[in-house]
Image (cartoon, grey):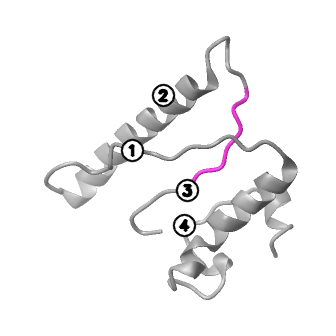
Amino acid sequence: MPNQVHLVFKLLSDEGNSKHILVSKLLQSLKRYTARKANQVLDPKGQFWQHESYDRVIRNQDELESTIRYVLNNPVKADLVSHWQEWPYTFCKTRFKNDFL
């Protein structure tokens, strides 16, 4: 989507910390890096990213597949493309992609 980012990822280790803190730190780092790079190109005025983010824990395989399907089809739902594979900014691991071809 041109004005948002969707990520589905697995935390490899929580190193004794709460997973929520790790996700918050990851998103903070990602937003800081991408905002800096985008600002170099776009030279915008003001805040680049909104402060909030929406995160949720995926508890089983069905929920994982449903979430991936939602993310992949988001540009289709927004009428930006007719099929998710046409959206040039989509990256999906092959093992998940095969389920949605």
Which element is circle 4 on?
loop
Disc 2 packing (10 Å; few <14; some 14–19; many ≥20): few
Give the magenta-colored segment's residue range.
6-12
- Please name the residue shown 27% across and 51% down the image: 48
Q: Which disc number belongs to residue 89?
A: 4
Q: Nearer the viewer, mark 1 or mark 3?
A: 1
Q: Which residue is mark 1?
A: 52
Which element is circle 2 on?
helix
| Labels 4 and 3: the sequence-earlier one | 3
Please provide percent x and percent y for residue 81.
56, 85
| Residue found at the very far left of the displayed protein | 45
For the residue marked with disc 1, what is the amino acid?
Answer: Glu
Query: Relative to 78, is 93 above or below?
Result: above
| Labels 2 and 4: the sequence-earlier one | 2
Image quarter where the C terminus lies is bottom right
In the depicted view, which residue is nearer to us: 42 or 75?
A: 75
Which element is circle 1 on?
loop
The answer to whether the residue labelled 4 contacts the one labelled 3, judged by CB atoms less than 8 Å apart, is no
Q: Which residue is mark 3?
A: 6
For the residue marked with disc 4, what is the amino acid?
Answer: Tyr
Mark 2 and mark 4: Cα distance apart in space: 24 Å
Q: Nearer the viewer, mark 4 or mark 3?
A: 3
In the depicted view, which residue is nearer to us: 88 or 84?
A: 84
For the residue marked with disc 3, what is the amino acid?
Answer: His
Query: Relative to 57, is 97 above or below?
Result: below
Q: Which residue is mark 2?
A: 25
- Please name the residue shown 62% across and 81% down the image: 86
| Labels 1 and 3: the sequence-earlier one | 3
The answer to whether the residue labelled 2 contacts the one labelled 3, judged by CB atoms less than 8 Å apart, is no
